[in-house]
Image: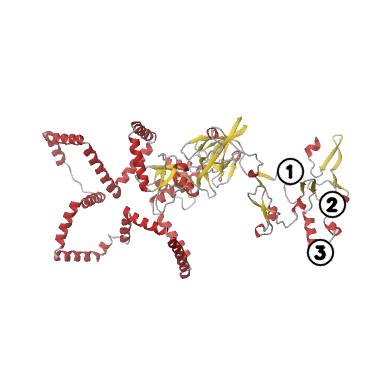
Amino acid sequence: MVQDFSLRYPLIDGQGNFGCFTGDTKIKLLDGTEKSFEELAKLSPDEIFYVYSIDDNGQIVVGEGKNARLTRRNAELIELTIDNGEKIRCTPDHRFMLRDGTYKEAKDLTPDDCLMPGYFDTAQIKEGLNEYLRVFQPASEEYDFVHHIADEFNAQRGIARVFGGPFVRHHKNFNRMDNSPTNIVRMDFLEHLHLHAENITELWEDDEFRELQKQGVKRYYDDHPEVREQRRNIFINQNKQEEFRKENASRSSAGIKRYYSQNPQACAEISMRMKALWEDEDYRSRMRTALANIEKRELSPEEKARIAQIISEKSRQMWKNEEKRSQIVEAISRALSSEKVRAKLSENSRRNWQNPDYRAKYSEDHFSKMALKSWEKPETRVMHREKIARQWQDLSFCDAQRKGVIHSNELRIQQNPAMMSELAACAACTLEKKWTDPEYKNTVMRQKIAGYVAQLLKKYEVITPDVYESNRDKNWIPRIETALKYFDNFDHLLTAAQNYNHHIISKRFLDGHTDTYDITVDGYHNFLLASGVFVHNSIDGDSAAAMRYTEVRLGKISEEIFGDIDKETVDFVPNYDDSLKEPSVMPCKLPNLLINGSTGIAVGMATNMPPHNLGEIIDGITLVIDNPEAGFNDLFKVVKGPDFPTAGFIYGRQGIIDAFSTGRGSIKMRARATIEEIKGKEQIIVTELPYQVNKAKLIE
């Protein structure tokens, strides 16, 4: 026989997932909520809810969940405890996704298995703006903003507005944690600004909203003191930046001026209070003493630089004043009207540029930086953006640009055959340059170090700095002193390692039975539980034998049946519902039905074709190829008759001769049996059964 599993092994594998979860198990949804299977089962079977899924590239994407339903009643359960403390109750056969994208049933999971995790955090898109939800991408090992992922989902389906330049992804309900694709819409910057301006005015007129906002912010920071400290550090770092101080100074100044212009009484109160203080002789005396006793110290280079920066900023502010600028320009113009002054300035400038020390003050990319500075101006970017947008609307421009790029690439390859190698070298340089970015380096090193310590956690119950050092067996693993530079402390490092991958720390079969649920996620067939791991779904509510659920398990030799099928060796015809094409026959090198046997039923007739020996059939084919005129008697010398996998006796050869010569014949079989005496009694011992005789039925 060809197949190694013959009759006693199943030919069908389930393609879906037949495992399920208890109704109180929760799923993490893109709308920012976590809902149980029981809650989702109350929805219409066709109602879509958005889940986190893993695509074929290992990236977290938007999945369309539906049809949450009761799948089993009184099902056997197993309880898994994950290293983050979460407990999951499901059927033993439910499949969990591993870190490499494969699946493993719950009952077969071990502490050594790395489960596919879902990690989230929040971050600012730009400094000074609100924080948005991010998810860690297992494939790229980088965090992506979830609303960007939802926007990409919309774009792939053609329901997102197309922009020639930058755009904003807006949450329609103003909830930054609700990242459902239906809640994300693209807008240009001005449209987005006006929308928020209109709504914030309306919202802040509501006393209840203001109080709820105040209490919500206070409660959030009380519950998350680490976030308060994080934002404090953000503000400190922002105030150290020239650009932020420049923008914030004018904004703060304008705000203070606006406040006092709208509240003249407050301004008058401050003025009266300060006047009263300075009219107090005791206050003036104390202030004189305090100022007189101040000891001035030498400023550090950093302080000098900071003060110089402040003076520079004040000077820039002064130049923004039209009146002051006119006065300064007039004074400079008067001075430069003197030929003697101009000559002196020219001489000084020439002497300075001939001095290497002076030139060293300016970097080689000095003029490049000037250009970049120009591009920082919104009006410059808008001008070029509009120009490029107009060009790309011209089809002739697009075609010319495409042809130009192709021609340019062809010339570059001709002129420099080693161009690709050089590009690879440039890529290496770029990566090296990227490594100089502290944030990039910090992210990569944190992940690498956490991964190393995560491996140590599998081997040791307690991880100490000594354990860390003694197990360093690769050059990239930094010393503990260096590693701790990327974490707040050693405990922080251990926490990061514990969350690097999810593992189960225990599993146990539960005594009770309960109803279980599952959902369908079309396309990706997996979703993220609220406990932080990805699991397989059920494809839909059909039975396990439904067409969409099943696939034939092929032995390796069976692949020969499909040989050269892509070379138009056979015709393709519509399948049963005209949804697909299927081959009319298989381009098999051997008569598979004759070897394996088959049963066919048609209107008014039926046929049973017995299996035959593979070697004999091959010899018969060879005989016919070598001698096309070979007759039945010649073939009968090679192919002795059917070859049944269960063996047994064939009674008589006439039925075989009739079947081979006319296509009709009856083959009678009997079992191979012996009579033996066992424990003083005679017993019939059957060692071979006729083909298709069921031993259980025979015993009955």
Q: Which residue lies furthest to the bottom in this view?
A: 415
Q: Give the amino acid at mark 1.
A: Arg
Mark 1: which secondary structure?
Answer: loop
* Circle 3 Cα neighbour tier, 10 Å, few/some/many (<14 / 14–19 / ≥20): few
In the shown orientation, is residue 306 left or right of residue 330? right
Mark 3: which secondary structure?
Answer: loop
Give the distance between the C-alpha atoms of the residues marked 1 and 2, in whole angstroms: 27 Å
What residue appears at the point 15 percent right and 38 percent down from the top-left corner? 287
* Circle 1 Cα neighbour tier, 10 Å, few/some/many (<14 / 14–19 / ≥20): few
Give the distance between the C-alpha atoms of the residues marked 2 and 3, in whole angstroms: 22 Å
Q: Give the amino acid at mark 3.
A: Asn
**Residue identified by numbered label 1:** 8
Query: In terms of sequence position, does the residue under pointer 2 or pointer 3 come before the other?
Result: 3
Query: In terms of sequence position, does the residue under pointer 1 or pointer 2 come before the other?
Result: 1
Residue 527 lies, with reference to residue 642, above or below; the image says above
**Residue identified by numbered label 2:** 659
Q: Position of residue 20 (x, y in %)?
A: 59, 36
Give the distance between the C-alpha atoms of the residues marked 3 and 1, in whole angstroms: 39 Å
**Residue identified by numbered label 3:** 627
Mark 2: which secondary structure?
Answer: helix
Marks 2/3 in contact by CB < 8 Å: the verdict is no
Decide which of 563, 297 is in the foreground and name it: 563
Q: Where is residue 91 in the image (x, y as percent from the top left)?
A: 60, 36
Instruction: Tell me where residue 568 sits by quadrant.
Output: bottom right
Residue 594 lies, with reference to residue 283, above or below; the image says below
Q: Position of residue 608 (x, y in %)?
A: 79, 47
